[in-house]
Image: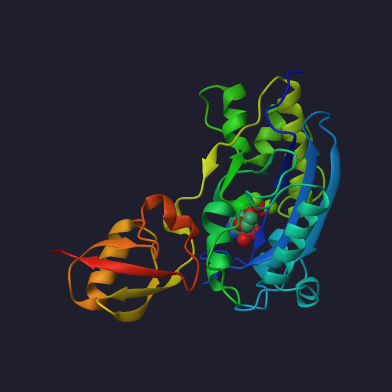
Amino acid sequence: MHSQPLDYVVVLDFEATCDDKNPPVPQEIIEFPSILVNMKTLEPEDEFSTFVRPVHHPILTDFCKELTSITQEQVDTAPTFSEVFEQYMAWLRSHGLPVTPEEEGPSYAILLCGDWDFRIMLPTQLETCEPAFDYVPHPFRQWINVKRIFERWYGKRKVPGMPGMLRALGLKLTGRHHRGIDDCRNITKIVQALATRGLSFDITSELSVRRYPPVDLSITFNGDTQTLTLGKRSMSSLLGSTSSLFRREVVQVQFPDGAEVTEADLPDLRNGTSLNALGKE
Ligand code: AMP
Ligand code: MG
Ligand code: MG
């Protein structure tokens, strides 16, 4: 077996409100499960498993209950997303895994089957939960899509879904497909099988800053201070919205210390950040 670049991989698979055609808007997470896998031994060391109570559409559709096997009572008695998200971060920390860049500890990344969980579902959830998040915690900014690792072994053929990957690796699907914790256990088997075949698990995907939740900024221009909700975190949106707000062409935005706000600063802007706008001379 080859050595792995990361000490741990944390397998995660959300289940969410849904219907046979379009999902409810906003779609909400109803199960938040994970498995901590030690990449030196390939052994699962712990599981995190909880249901989540949806607040915008608290009643699950028959389709959703049938698909996931999750019952109305299981979500009715569950904590809300914000509470679960806190518990999840505490769980990562309880295993010594850093959740901010300042913390030290073993190297790890969250692993998904696909990109949907973090590219679509998590941004929606962060933006619509109460209170809404104004940032994306670091463990959720980049991840491993197991399909990209599987692809390196499978060659040019189209990567199948989880049941197809299991089959291709000679493994059986155990438990109930579309129950989050069972999906995590099956995805873990795929990780073990690929690692045993010499595949290396490294980051494959990252969240575009454009998908980060909106942030409320306090912007001053010529002594006039206004609040701006930046819906889309791009430099063109920041300059464009600031120009509209003050009805003057704004060419640069600076932090109070005079440093220019650039693309690289956008992920870390938080509610209440004070900025200064500069107009065209
Ligand atoms: P999965 O991890 O594949 O079990 O799916 C995650 C979530 O995507 C589910 O909880 C549903 O909200 C949604 N989903 C998955 N498959 C379907 C489907 N066939 N029809 C509608 N929604 C689905
Ligand atoms: Mg999934
Ligand atoms: Mg699933």
Q: Nearer the viewer, residue 274 or 249?
A: 274
Q: Position of residue 253 (x, y in %)?
A: 31, 63
Q: Nearer the viewer, residue 47 or 173?
A: 47
The image quadrant that residue 148 belongs to is: top right
Q: Nearer the viewer, residue 241 or 189?
A: 241
The image quadrant that residue 31 belongs to is: bottom right
Q: Position of residue 259 (x, y in %)?
A: 36, 56
Residue visible at 45% across and 50% down?
A: 208
Q: Is residue 188 above or below residue 259?
A: above
- Left of 72 or right of it: where is 20? left
Residue visible at 23% across and 77% down?
A: 246
Give the colour scheme of this rendering: rainbow
Residue visible at 19% across and 77% down?
A: 247
Q: Is residue 236 above or below residue 186?
A: below
Tell how many labels.
0
Quadrant assignment for the N terminus: top right
Q: Of all residues shown, which one is farthest toward the left?
A: 281
Quadrant assignment for the C terminus: bottom left
- Left of 146 or right of it: where is 179? right
- Mark yes or no: residue 232 visible: yes
Q: Of all residues shown, which one is farthest toward the front?
A: 257
Q: Is residue 256 above or below residue 106?
A: below
The image quadrant that residue 279 belongs to is: bottom left
- Mark yes or no: residue 170 visible: no
Q: Nearer the viewer, residue 135 or 82?
A: 135
Q: Is residue 9 above or below residue 48?
A: above
- Left of 179 or right of it: where is 122? left
Q: Position of residue 156 (x, y in %)?
A: 51, 23
